[in-house]
Amino acid sequence: MYSEKVMDHFSNPRNVGEIENASGVGTVGNAKCGDIMRIYLDINADGIIEDVKFKTFGCGAAVATSSMATELVKGKTVNEALLITNKAVMDALDGLPPVKVHCSLLAEEAIHAALWDYATKNNLVIEGLEKPKSDIGEEEVEENY
Ligand code: FES
C-alpha cells in the first residue's frame, strides 16, 4: 500500500534533528490525529535555505513526507520553497494512500510556519505567504510531548 520511496523515507528519514539558532522554526499540529511536526530552517543572507531539519511526533506517512519535503526545500530560495506543495511532496514519494493525504499537509504547513517565523524575525514580506493557521507555541508542544 505504500510506495518504495515512502518506505525508504520512513525507515531512513533524512534531515532529522534540530538547528540551533535557526533562521525560522515552525511547529504545526493536526487537531484530528494529534500529530505534531516542527521544522527548522537555516536561511543565508541571500535568502537560500542552506539547511533544514525536522522533528515529528507523528505517523509514518508524516515522517516520510517531512523527510522528502526537507530534501526538496534544501538549497532552494525562500520563494521556491513556498511553491513546494504537499502534492509535490507526494508526487516525489510516488503517492500516498488517500487516507494518509492529510499527513502530507503537516510538512507543507510546518515549512510555511518556519518561513513565516523567518519573515517575522527579519521584517520581510514574502509574497504569497500567509500567517500559519495552526502554529503552536513552544510551550504547548513541550506539554504535549
Ligand atoms: Fe496524523 Fe498521519 S495520522 S499525521
Image (cartoon, grey):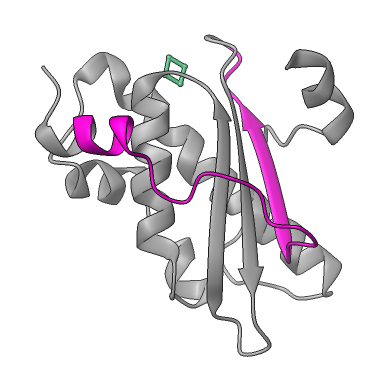
- Verify whether residue 109 appears in magenta: no
Q: Residue at coordinates 36% horizontally, 22% vertically from top-left?
A: 60
Quadrant of residue 42 within the rendered picture: bottom right
Depth check, front residue: 117 or 139 = 139
Rendering quadrant holding ligand 1: top left
- Residue at the image position 37 percent from the left and 40 percent from the top: 13
Taking the view exactly as shown, the residue that stands out farthest to the bottom is: 46
In-front residue for pair 122/62:
62
What's drawn in magenta, residue-wise? 7-31
Residue 98 sits in quarter: top left
The quarter of the image holding the C terminus is top right
Q: Is residue 91 left or right of residue 130?
A: left
Number of numbered discs on residues: 0
Residue 114 vs residue 97: left or right? right
Residue 66 rendering spot, x and y as whole percentages: 43, 41
| Residue 132 seen from this side | no
Vertical order, 103 against 21 (above or below)? above
Q: In which quarter of the image is residue 134?
A: top right
Q: Residue at x 65, y 82 (%)?
A: 44
Residue 5 lies, with reference to residue 30, above or below; the image says: below
Q: Is residue 19 magenta?
A: yes
- In this view of the protein, can residue 3 be seen by the observer? yes
Q: Is residue 107 above or below residue 41?
A: above
